[in-house]
């Protein structure tokens, strides 16, 4: 390793990436963003400060006085007016930890955390509504806002799950009906909606629908926050010695251990929490910054060194043209800098206020490539261009593209660039681009994109398209409808589907490699747009059709004819058809931006419209290495393998065929057969309490507003989206082998003298391929099965051959032991691959041998 590499690694280690961090005992870099859909109300800022301040005291109490909220930043929308807001740095709505936005239709004003990772993994964000922060009547229903914040923080930061269950609010245990809760020390009564004793269903021995658990207002236990943070006595998390392992809640299904155990043993803060000393006195109050991001200020810093000659320079022109023509917002400011042996300013910052301004900027894009790759010269000049508008670069953006390793010593400029406050997005073109690019983006809150030299994949253009800064109003964000490419000497024909949620600012961008083809585009009603109605940039070999007004919904047909062999691509983008109806959007990401091969990589694609999940769509991910080799992977929303929850609109899959180096991620979603549906799925959230028992009398809270549970038709649509790129570095020449994935959806039902078990088949390698065999065990004792799986009763599975990963497994077994009525039996499965490597033990399923019960409970 040479000295230059050592220097680069040193500043990478010394720099800290954006995101929540612990500074001593205090959490810092907590970003709370208000959506631009929320009308200005400065009292919301005070409400947020109050919630975090009180939440800090509760957090300090909850974890042995070890942690608290030290610093938080509140990002207000660009359309709010005040001289009291300072300029945002790397903060953005998209990357905020806590969002203040209009209600999710499934939750109403109930706070929740978007969480779809494995137990112990950080979640995506917490969602509070403005009304939750303003309406004090909700405090009685959900608890103090500070306590609710700590409940949601545990989801967000430590990856624990709820200890209550709306789908399974009761269970049968040792001859008694129990409320699903933790700890069992929380006492209460069962009543129906009319405050009458609940009826019992003779088939299940459980209370009938409508029965609810009303906790005693005053309790003699302090746990648990993940069950009922609204109780005054509750101040901490369930400990291992009091954890209720039988309760059919998500914490047991996903984690199988106490919430406190997960926090101290599996979470991102596990090492810090073990070593931190408790604060002897009360924690100091959090400090707050209120910041605002106004119109974007962006400088393109483009590599024009000798290695960019030929096809790479053409692709740079095409991608930058598309960005300036269709992606960057009106009223944003843009500048252009190039670098090779020297750096040049091709355009100072220019406000984009018309189509002619966009055209002027496009004409200034570089056309010649020569010289060496002096990265620092380009980076320093880009920062100087950004300084020209107001004297600093705080929150401004650089889009930095290069295809080679730095000729100069980047240690002389990169640390200063990181400290400047600018957001630096980096694009690595080809497999020789400098390895520091990913870290530079990570340290500044920018995006990291890679693009191979495969022209047809159009990765560079897609990468530029993905560099946006959303503010929470998705009606104003560009949507990539579709993208396709073909190498041909004849016709390139196809269809682009414009669905009903989009239509304004619709554009079709066609790129060609050598000579101008003949192009025509036909609307669904039959109107034909000829080349004379399109913009042709001869230098960038790009043709663009901007559809006037709102594009007609339906199939738009394109016909492109060439007489010579060349590569052709088409990309279609649009925006929301109506200002009050957000479009269907797709967000794609990997669970790790850097992997050393020890933990499996997972691909995620979230498909939704205004928080409503879109289910039963067809979702494919393309993962392309920097050398150009690509792999396709169908993502699933089946609640098995890498997918945490069935039908939640998050499609997932393990990526096992990882390659060393950097890779790009592209996801294509389509619903051409009309099978997709909107679903209103509520999984967890701050628990609603129907009322409390005070001195034996039920005191009701306000009823919870109803939400629609109807599954609605989506209609035909397509989307293509580019996620941030990722990097893999493992030892050896081949990727690591992983065992079969953990089975997470095992269910059991006792039928007379046999047991029917259902689960989704794992693979040979996580959720790929076919496992070799199953080991299925059962016990009357949950603790024995959990802690001594190999000593529990075993079923004979010699006749069971595992099916391909993702298949439904359903098998009936005879325990060969008489199971008495009223007995609960517990079951678990372990998979084995061809190398005799075993998976983790599945979730523990329980089944009850039922007997007729009393009429009331």
Image (spheres, rainbow, N blue to C red):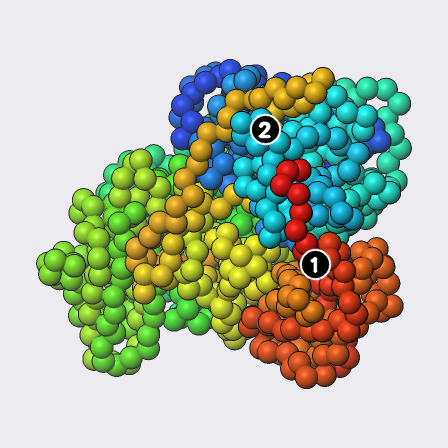
Quadrant in which residue 26 is drawn: top right
Give residue 117's position: percent from left, percent from top. Answer: 63, 52
Which of the pair 397/235 is nearer the observer?
A: 235
Q: Is residue 506 above or below residue 76?
A: below
Give residue 590's position: percent from left, percent from top. Answer: 58, 57
The local secondary structure at tag 1 comes to loop
Give residue 115's position: percent from left, percent from top. Answer: 59, 46
Q: Give the residue drawn at x 66%, y 80%.
A: 800
Which image quarter holds the C terminus? top right
Q: Give the residue drawn at x 80%, y 59%.
A: 780
Reading the image, the residue beneath label 1 is 849
Give residue 609's position: percent from left, percent from top. Answer: 40, 46
**Cα distance in 3D space between marks 1 and 2:** 28 Å
Q: Is residue 57 left or right of residue 242?
A: left
Which of the pair 831/134 is nearer the observer?
A: 831
Q: Give the residue drawn at x 79%, y 34%.
A: 185
Q: Residue 422, can we see it? A: no
The local secondary structure at tag 2 comes to loop
Q: Is residue 180 above or below residue 190?
A: below
Reading the image, the residue beneath label 2 is 196
């Amino acid at each position: 390793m040479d000295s230059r590499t050592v220097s680069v690694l040193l500043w990478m280690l010394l720099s800290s990436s954006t995101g929540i961090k612990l500074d001593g005992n205090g959490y810092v870099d907590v970003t709370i963003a208000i959506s631009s859909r929320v009308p200005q109300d400065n009292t919301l800022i005070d409400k947020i400060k109050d919630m975090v301040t009180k939440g800090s005291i509760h957090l300090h109490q909850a974890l042995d006085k070890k942690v608290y909220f030290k610093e938080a930043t509140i990002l207000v929308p660009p359309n709010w007016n005040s001289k009291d807001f300072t300029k945002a740095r790397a903060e953005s709505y998209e990357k905020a930890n806590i969002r203040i936005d209009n209600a999710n239709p499934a939750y109403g004003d109930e706070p929740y955390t978007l969480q779809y990772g494995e137990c112990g993994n950080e979640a995506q964000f917490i969602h509070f509504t403005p009304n939750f922060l303003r309406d004090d009547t909700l405090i009685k229903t959900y608890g103090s806002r500070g306590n609710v914040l700590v409940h949601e923080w545990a989801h967000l930061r430590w990856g624990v799950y709820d200890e209550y269950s709306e789908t399974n609010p009761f269970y049968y245990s040792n001859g008694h009906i129990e409320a699903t809760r933790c700890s069992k020390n929380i006492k209460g009564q069962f009543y129906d909606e009319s405050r009458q004793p609940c009826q019992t269903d003779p088939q299940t021995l459980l209370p009938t629908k409508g029965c609810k658990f009303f906790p005693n207002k005053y309790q003699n236990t302090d746990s648990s926050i993940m069950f009922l943070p609204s109780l005054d006595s509750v101040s901490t998390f369930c400990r291992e010695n009091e954890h209720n392992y039988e309760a059919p809640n998500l914490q047991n299904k996903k984690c199988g251990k106490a919430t406190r155990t997960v926090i101290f043993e599996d979470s991102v803060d596990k090492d810090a929490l073990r070593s931190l000393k408790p604060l002897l006195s009360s924690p100091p109050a959090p400090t707050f910054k209120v910041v605002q991001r106004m119109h974007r200020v962006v400088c393109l810093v483009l590599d024009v060194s000798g290695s960019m000659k030929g096809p790479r320079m053409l692709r740079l022109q095409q991608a930058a043209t598309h960005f300036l023509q269709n992606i960057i917002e009106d009223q944003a400011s843009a500048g252009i800098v190039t670098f090779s042996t020297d750096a040049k300013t091709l355009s100072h910052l220019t406000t984009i206020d018309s189509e002619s301004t966009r055209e002027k900027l496009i004409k200034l894009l570089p056309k010649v490539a020569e010289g060496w790759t002096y990265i620092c010269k380009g980076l320093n000049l880009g920062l100087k261009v950004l300084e020209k508008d107001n004297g600093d670069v705080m929150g401004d953006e650089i889009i930095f593209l290069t295809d080679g390793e730095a000729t100069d010593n980047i240690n002389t400029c990169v640390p200063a660039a990181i400290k400047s406050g600018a957001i630096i997005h980096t694009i690595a073109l080809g497999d020789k681009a400098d390895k520091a690019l990913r870290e530079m983006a990570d340290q500044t809150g920018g995006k990291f994109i890679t693009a191979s030299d495969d022209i047809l994949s159009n990765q560079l253009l897609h990468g530029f398209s993905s560099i946006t800064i959303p503010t929470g109003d998705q009606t104003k964000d560009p949507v990539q409808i579709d993208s396709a490419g073909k190498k041909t000497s004849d016709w390139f024909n196809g269809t682009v589907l414009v669905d009903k949620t989009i239509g304004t600012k619709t554009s079709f961008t066609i790129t060609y490699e050598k000579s101008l083809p003949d192009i025509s585009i036909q609307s669904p009603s039959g109107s034909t747009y000829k080349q004379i109605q399109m913009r042709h940039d001869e230098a960038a070999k790009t043709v663009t059709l901007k559809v006037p007004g709102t594009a007609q919904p339906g199939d738009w047909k394109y016909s492109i004819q060439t007489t010579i062999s060349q590569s052709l691509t088409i990309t279609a983008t649009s925006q929301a058809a109506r200002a009050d109806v957000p479009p269907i959007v797709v967000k794609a990401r990997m669970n790790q931006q850097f992997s050393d091969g020890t933990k499996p990589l997972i691909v995620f694609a979230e498909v939704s419209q205004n928080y409503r999940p879109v289910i039963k769509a067809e979702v494919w991910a393309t993962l392309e290495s920097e050398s150009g080799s690509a792999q396709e992977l169908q993502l699933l929303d089946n609640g098995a393998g890498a997918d945490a929850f069935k039908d939640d609109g998050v499609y997932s899959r393990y990526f096992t065929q990882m390659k060393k180096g950097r890779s790009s991620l592209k996801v294509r979603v389509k619903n051409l057969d009309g099978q997709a549906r909107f679903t209103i799925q509520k999984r967890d959230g701050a628990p609603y309490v129907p009322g409390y028992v005070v001195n034996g009398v039920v005191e009701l809270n306000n009823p919870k507003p109803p939400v629609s549970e109807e599954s609605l038709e989506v209609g035909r649509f397509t989307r293509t989206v580019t996620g941030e790129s990722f990097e893999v570095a493992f030892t050896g020449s081949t990727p690591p082998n992983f065992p079969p994935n953990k089975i997470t959806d095992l269910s059991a039902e006792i039928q007379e003298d046999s047991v029917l078990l259902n689960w989704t088949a794992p693979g040979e390698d996580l959720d790929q391929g076919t496992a070799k065999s199953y080991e299925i065990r059962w016990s009357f004792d949950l603790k024995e099965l959990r802690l001594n799986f190999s000593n529990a009763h075993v079923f004979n599975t010699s006749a069971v051959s595992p099916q391909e990963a993702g298949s439904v497994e359903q098998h009936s077994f005879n325990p060969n032991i008489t199971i008495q009525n009223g007995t609960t039996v517990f079951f678990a499965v372990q998979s084995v691959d061809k190398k005799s490597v075993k998976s983790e033990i599945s979730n523990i399923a329980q089944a009850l041998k039922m007997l007729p019960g009393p009429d009331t409970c």
